[in-house]
Amino acid sequence: MGVVASAPAKVILFGEHFVVYGEPAIVLAIDKRAYVKVETRNDKRIYARSANLNIAGYFEEGVFHPEKGGENARYKLEPVKTVVDKVFELAGRNAGLNIEIRSTVPVAAGLGSSAAVAAATALAVAKTLDIELAKEEVFRITYEAERVVHGTPSGVDPAIATFGGALLFQMDTGVKPLEAEMDIPLVIGDTQIQRSTRDLVAKVRRLREKFPAVIEPIMRSGRKIVLHAIEAIKQQDLETLGELVDINHGLLCAVGVSHEALERLISEARKAGALGAKLTGAGGGGCMIALTEHDKLDAVAEAIQRAGGIPYVARKTDVGARIEP
Ligand code: PMV
């Protein structure tokens, strides 16, 4: 038995990194999900296991006891514990829990796997304790968990994992659903190089502190790209969107978050006919996306594979965090 909840992965179409400094970002939920199953236990332990990551361990009286994966297990499961504690607070009671994480989202790749796991955990634990969480509460709890992982997250990952769909996200104004009737066909290319969002965000911060007069205008250009992109989405103008994707990638290179493996995949995707290609998420490895007309999706996916990446054709999903039927 037990309760199963899930939440989607995401790709940031425009605005990663700059979003940390208050600029807008456009983000899409995609058809890869994290699933979390929760059951009560007879003791007070919070036992958590991730088959994909090959880690397991339990928290008892605030202390973590690894069973598989040592320190890495603690690092990966700490945010899950944060989520559990927040839900306990809301429920006004505790319970021993078994938490099983199954995810089809590549980890540390820029696809928001940690936020998807946190959002699904919040819903599944709440349901197990017989409380209903409003979407805003799922978002808030997921954001708290992301703070444990990333330090100073913008909140874009928690927002999309919670609400799904296509969102315009900005730190001070929050989440606005984008009327994206338009199909936005994408190939994701995973370099399989894991990296730390925290480190990359810190790298951009250092650069911005050292060269404010150089970096701040780059970030403002990022905002203008998003404004043009909103128009292009309204007009269903895929070609313009592709051009904007390429310009956005140029800005991300300028702030030092690309990687030679990303550059290889991006360049091959463009040669194979993508309308535009950029890194997505924190960069430094992880994933790129190629905006591609339908009839070229296969050719672009093959080019990404030949260049050493793992391609996925991604579809937008409107299904945010939910309890599985
Ligand atoms: O790579 P990810 O999925 O962790 O995305 C991070 C997005 C950033 O803009 C780089 C950081 C943030 O908190 O918004």
Image (tube, rainbow, N blue to C red):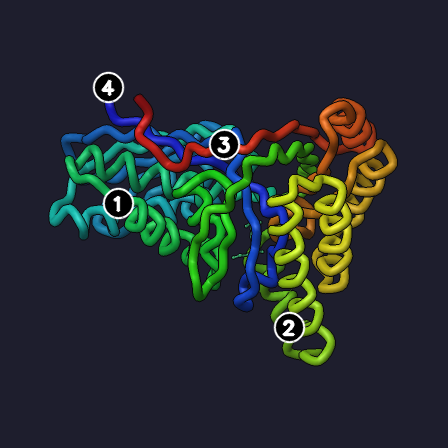
Q: CA distance from mark 4 to mark 3?
A: 27 Å
Cα separation, mark 2 vs mark 3, equals 35 Å
Residue beneath the point at 61% across and 70% down: 205
The residue lying at 15 percent from left, 35 percent from top is 130
Seen from the viewer's position, the closer of residues 242 and 277 is 242
Query: What residue sits 55% from the left and 46% below the top?
Result: 27
Rendered position, 57 above or below 152: above
The residue singled out by tag 2 in the image is 206
Q: Which quadrant holds residue 193?
A: top right
Identify which amino acid the numbered label 2 is placed on.
Arg
Sequence order check: which comes first, mark 2 or mark 3? 2
Residue at (24% x, 43% y) in the render? 133
Q: Judge from the rendering whether residue 237 lies leftward or rightward of residue 325; answer left or right.
A: right
Residue type (three-letter) at the residue carrying disc 3: Thr
Q: Can you identify the residue that label 4 sits on?
A: 1
Residue contact between numbered discs 1 and 3, judged by CB atoms under 8 Å: no
Kindly tell me whether residue 301 is visible in this rendering.
Answer: yes
Which quadrant would the N terminus be assigned to in this image?
A: top left
- List the residue tagged with mark 1: 134
